[in-house]
Image (cartoon, rainbow, N blue to C red):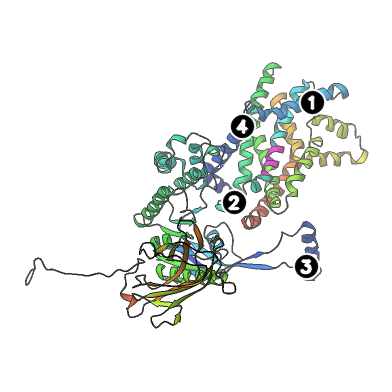
Amino acid sequence: MKPIIEVNHLTKEYQLGHITSLKESVLNTFRRLGGKPAQQRENFKALDDVNFTIEKGEVVGIIGHNGAGKSTLLKHLANISNPTKGNVIVRGSVAPLIEVGAGVNPELTGRENIFLNGAILGIPKKIIQQKLDEIIEFSELEQFIDTPVKRYSSGMTVKLGFSIATSMEADILIVDEVLAVGDIMFQQKCIERMEHLIKREGRTVLIVGHNIRQLERICSRVMLMDHGQISNDGNPSEICRIFFHEAQERTLTRHKPVEGIIPPQSDAGIIQVTNIEILDHDGNCSAHVNFHEDLTLRITFECSKKLIRPEIVVGLHTSDFVHILSVSNALADIRQDLEMGKHQLTCRLTDIPLRPSSYNLRLAFIDQHRQMLWYAENIMPVTVLPGRFNIARLPEIGLIDLATSWNFKTLSHVNGLV
Amino acid sequence: MIKVVKNLYQYRELIAALAWKNIVIRYKQAYLGVLWAVLKPIMLMLIFTLVRSFVGIESDDLPYPILTFAALLPWVFFQESASEGVSSVTSNAALIKKIYFPREVFPITAMVTKTVELGISFVILAGMMIYYKMVPTIYALWVPAIIFYTMIVALGISFFGAAVNVYYRDMSQALPVVLSLLMYGSPVMYPLSLVHKKLIEEQAAGVWSNDLYTLYTLNPLAGIIDSFQRVVLKGLPPDFNALYPGLILTLVILPFSYVFFKRAENWFADVI
């Protein structure tokens, strides 16, 4: 069977700057007629020789930083834009959920908008009528369905848009950052609906998003885009990890400590952190730690005032700010007064259970009245290496590994042939 | 051309829904509602009637108000369809950037919207005919054909204009000005018979008279308005001599206009 989507050497160029004025177009026409070169504006390649195919039933996530060409690519698949070079072959009907609610008109009521948007998405009126109750129910807007949309909250509008768009029965769904709609409850519902469409009905889906964990969960394949090209394509968890890594490197170059003083995000002006080091178990400076081994941090700081029983919190988070770990000297009840002056704190985290990947350090100083004295996230990367473990044996998902014991007991067994 | 009709049929529900939306949102929060749609021809009719009381315009032995209203009916329909059509693509920029369907849906929708308003004007015209005790004859059956022809003329302008307007917004500014000038070049305030009398019978412009008359009727609206008045008010068949120069011009322009639109369409989403 032929792939449902085929993209060959797709290139899209945009001209930078403002559209040529009438005068310039006329002048350019004369220049061209006169055999002279016309004035050219600078070109920008939004997509640069992109090639891929997608089979029926695949769920493909597209990730990449802003301006990498993700939305431009979707626009070509939805036939909204036309390529400069190359071609796009789509074998099936496409439902573009690009920013749901594009066609929602504020003057019309919810119900009227269902019919209007249905028509815009090409759903026959008969089918909308059949599905009307289902759409209204899913949108949770029963009470407001006959109120003009201009009186809706923004969340309600998006809920309405999503409910209409997903009721369309197309072969290919194109989704651009729409899963980030509504409150947590509704988001959950949206994801369930998407998963239902994907698993039960076998739709082919393309999703663009920034919520990498969500994509990792839904997709069977992920493409990473960079500067208009597909830089990586394949297994979701692997590609997502590459993406995280790149994002991390970028944040690092952004967050260089200034002359030995680590810039805090919030600061009461009492504490200055001058140095943070990771030590391996020989006491040497390092940038990483082995899986299930100890992590030692040495923090050098200065106080301009005597601190009474301060609390110090050390934590690790992922590059998308999932705070996986926080430890505090308060829980261990090792709080002591600190005189004005320079101090060095050594903190040892035993048996790091985080799966090998790159994490980020956060640090907080809190005084005895629970006032924040100093706080910073994303201070420096802490890379967990596999060490003595064979990482291939680790389950594919999960962030934390615990010491476990396993015990098999045979309750009954069958001898010979069954 | 067959493809156009096929597309039209395929997207009929969309066109209907968009036209319905246009009408609903325009009049939803207005107390007088759809009545505003017919205000323009009525006001113009009153003004023309007033002006005529000073300058004296022949009215072919018909009451002047109804004669000019019957002229304003196709004229206002044409003028509004064309100017709405020209700005229809740019005013739907949000949709154009998000979803694909043939873009000619927009100018056509603008025209369909205006057809509904035209329908309301017909009710007023019928009321006036009752007031003046006029009975339509069998020739009134020409009306749908005349309206259809008016649509074609309006589309010929909208397709080209809408495409140009995506690149240069000057189009939607210039068109209303040009069209309001064209109104004086069309037999709206005065009947075509007056022009015919001056140029053909009295040869007022000397040797140029016949050519000038052809030039005048090259404006499709001249034929349309005259035919409309003839079949509705006078109980006569349309005057084909007045119709054909404009018809030929329209049939030449429409395909070019449409092809231009379809070629420009590919870049709408990038440029708009």
Chain letter of mark 3 equals A
**Residue A70 spot, x, y in % from top left:** 53, 63
Q: Which residues are magenta?
A: B79-86
The residue carrying mark 2 is B96
Q: Main secondary structure of the magenta part?
A: helix
Q: Residue furthest right?
A: B206
Q: Are marks 1 and 2 on the same chain?
A: yes
Chain letter of mark 1 equals B
| Mark 1 nearby-residue class (10 Å; few <14, some 14–19, many ≥20) | few
**Residue A29 spot, x, y in % from top left:** 78, 63
- Above/below status of A156 relative to A288: above
> What distance separates the C-alpha of mark 4 from that of mark 1?
25 Å
Q: Is residue A249 visible?
A: yes
Callout 4 secondary element? helix
Chain letter of mark 2 equals B
Give residue B77's quadrant in the image.
Answer: top right
Residue at (62%, 28%) from the top-left corner? B33
Labels 1 and 2 touching (C-beta < 8 A)? no
The residue carrying mark 4 is B27
Q: Nearer the observer, disc 3 or disc 4? A: 4
> What distance separates the C-alpha of mark 1 from that of mark 2?
40 Å
Callout 1 secondary element? helix
The residue carrying mark 3 is A32
> What distance separates the C-alpha of mark 3 from that of mark 2?
31 Å
- Above/below status of A364 relative to A393: above
The residue carrying mark 1 is B47
Q: Nearer the observer, disc 3 or disc 2? A: 2
**Residue A346 spot, x, y in % from top left:** 42, 73
Chain letter of mark 4 equals B
Quarter containing the N terminus of chain A: bottom left
Q: Does the magenta portion include B104? A: no
Q: Are marks 4 and 1 on the same chain?
A: yes
